[in-house]
Image (tube, grey):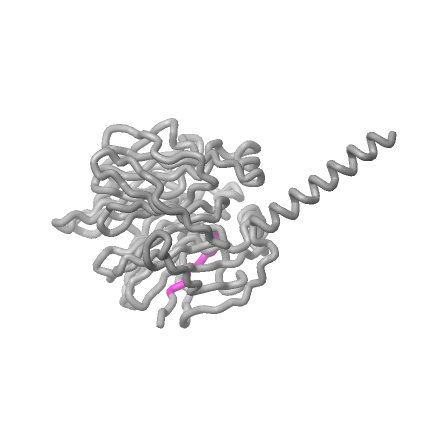
Amino acid sequence: MKKLLMVVGVLCVLLAGFALKTMRDAGQFRSIAPHAPGKCKPVSGMPGAEDITFHPSGGYAYVSSHDRRATAAGEVVRGDIYRYSLDGETPPVLLTEGFTQNFHPHGISLYVDPSGAQTLFVVNHSPGHGHHIERFEVGPDGLLVHRATVEDDRLVSPNDVVAVDAQRFYVTNDHGNPPGFWQTLEDYLQLGQGNVLYFDGRGFKKVIEGTKYANGINRSHDGATVYLAQSVGRTLNSYSRDVETGALTLRHSLALDTGPDNIELDAEGNLWVAAHPKLLDFAAYAGDTTGKARAPAQVLRLSGTDADMKVTEVFLDDGQQTSGTATAAIWGKRMLLGPVFEKDFLDCELP
């Protein structure tokens, strides 16, 4: 009996230690002191604006919208891509009305070639039909024209995509397992089973593996560097890119005291990373069906390169103004904050 009690006691201590470590790693003991660089106004009509990216001209942005709360509740709700103008007068324009396939957009990436022609890649989760990458071209009227659906069994849990040109791209698999028990185990045991795939115009190949929730991905303006955010790993990795083969070589890993999500670049090449400072709060918020749960939202600005990279916290909210922000898209003195679930995204002023 004594031995049994000792074993039970040791197990209880180990479980308590594991729980404390998990909470610490997830940022649960962090205090949140909200601040913003300027005024923010809510923009309605595009719920669940999980990813937003600007056209290089800066006059407008593309918004990936999907009402995930409604979908989780069993409603048949498709998502769409919108164009949002910064002029304050033009209403959002629905761009994918002509795309009649099952559409639940997630990460997006815009490529503009030297002639000005635009290609938009979109991660599409199609319930019952797997995961795809949709390739659209922007027509003369500004609407999106569907050109191709890229699919592969290796698209297990795609999250974000970054274009290399009008045909090639990288895509993150945030997990190595599909939704369910094993995917949850990946997160709470902090197992590195995610990966990054490269599509060379003909097929996929794995270029990064062993990631802990590979989330946002982007590239430098010159295309020589690829940046990867690992949410559970709480890191921002920089990779040198082989422009011929697409191979990525890890150059630097920056530890962050938060769970990074999507990555956007400003005109100067600085990185703007939306993040979840309390990952367990975000997990509870994501699983909440009542809409009452809230999760802190954070934005970091990263300037410089590799070991000289400077991290500045630009925005922090306790979940009251906005919640679960996944993207911070920047143009000049404007910052668009896209949430995963909220009905509105925020259009903020920068100093």
Could you tell me residue 29's position as x and y percent?
Answer: 61, 56
Query: Does the magenta segment cover residue 89?
Result: no
Location of residue 159 with respect to 347 vertically, above or below: above
Location of residue 168 with respect to 348 vertically, above or below: above
What residue do we see at 43% from left, 44% from top? 77
107 or 269: nearer the eye? 269
Location of residue 221 with respect to 200 vertically, above or below: below
Count of numbered tags: 0
Quarter of the image for residue 121 reads: top left
Extent of the magenta region: 341-347
User: Is 112 positioned to the left or the right of 191 in the image?
Assistant: left
310 or 283: nearer the eye? 310
What residue do we see at 47% from left, 59% from top? 298
What residue do we see at 31% from left, 35% from top? 198
Could you tell me residue 64's position as x and y percent?
Answer: 36, 49
152 or 310: nearer the eye? 310
State whether residue 96 appears in this view: no
Quarter of the image for residue 152 reads: top left
User: Is 2 positioned to the left or the right of 148 in the image?
Assistant: right
Q: In which quarter of the image is the N terminus?
A: top right
User: Is 281 positioned to the left or the right of 200 in the image?
Assistant: right
Q: In which quarter of the image is the C terminus?
A: bottom left
154 or 98: nearer the eye? 154
What residue do we see at 53% from left, 48% from top? 286
Quarter of the image for residue 83 reads: bottom left
Could you tell me residue 82's position as x and y percent?
Answer: 32, 53
Could you tell me residue 34's position as x and y percent?
Answer: 51, 67
Q: Which residue lies furthest to the front in this view?
A: 307
User: Is 309 positioned to the left or the right of 142 in the image?
Assistant: right
State whether residue 166 appears in this view: yes
